Image: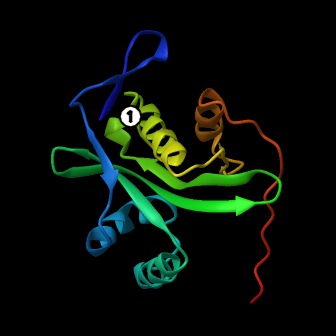
């Protein structure tokens, strides 16, 4: 458990609990996914979650007591141009908890976890229209190095 101290230093505390969400509790992340994209049906999200789990998907939860207040999906990948790395995916903190340093706490936890697994880097995607997200990722030390393209095949 972490909190941010003076000048952004990370201190241990009991402010929030951050941990991997157990597989039998992963449906608790679906409302967060819905908040990120209301256009995808819940049934589709449930199906995709099951497919993602088969491909190594993990999800980290941020808890205030027993209440889930934030999530980050995680992928551990190896790519030739960056090596073994961690990819935070669909990071979301409930609006009433935003701006309180919880995103920084979550990323500190993720970076520690990545290092424990031998990851040498982290990369992620951020929507072009998500200006607040882009600022946050830059504050976390990420650099824009590529464009992410997508094409629907059906």
Q: Quadrant of residue 2?
A: top left
Identified at 41% across, 78% down, the residue is: 42
Q: In the rendered image of this protein, does residue 27 appear above or below residue 7?
A: below
Q: How many marks?
A: 1
Residue situated in front as seen by the camera: 40 or 21: 21
Q: Give x and y (percent) for residue 70.
A: 36, 49
Identified at 51% across, 75% down, the residue is: 40
Extreme residue toward the bottom, this view:
154
Q: Give x and y (percent) for residue 56.
A: 52, 72
Q: In the rendered image of this protein, does residue 108 appear above or below residue 146?
A: above
Q: In the rendered image of this protein, does residue 101 appear above or below residue 153?
A: above
In the rendered view of the protein, which quadrant contains the C terminus? bottom right
Q: Give x and y (percent) for residue 55.
A: 55, 77
55 left or right of 13 in image: right
Residue situated in front as seen by the camera: 103 or 55: 55
In the rendered view of the protein, which quadrant contains the N terminus? top left
List the residue tagged with mark 1.
102
């Amino acid at each position: 458990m972490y909190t941010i101290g003076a000048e952004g230093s990370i201190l241990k505390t009991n402010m929030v609990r951050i941990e991997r969400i157990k597989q039998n509790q992963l449906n608790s992340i679906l409302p967060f996914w819905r908040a990120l994209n209301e256009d995808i049906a819940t049934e589709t999200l449930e199906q995709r979650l099951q497919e993602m789990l088969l491909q190594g998907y993990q999800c980290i939860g941020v808890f205030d007591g027993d209440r889930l207040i934030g999530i980050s999906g995680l992928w551990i990948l190896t790519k030739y141009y960056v090596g073994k790395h961690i990819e935070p995916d669909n990071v979301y903190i409930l609006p009433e908890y935003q701006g309180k340093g919880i995103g920084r706490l979550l990323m500190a936890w993720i970076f520690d976890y990545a290092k424990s697994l031998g990851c040498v880097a982290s990369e992620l995607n951020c929507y072009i229209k998500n200006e607040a997200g882009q600022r946050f990722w830059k504050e976390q030390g990420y650099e824009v190095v590529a464009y992410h393209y997508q094409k629907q095949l059906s």
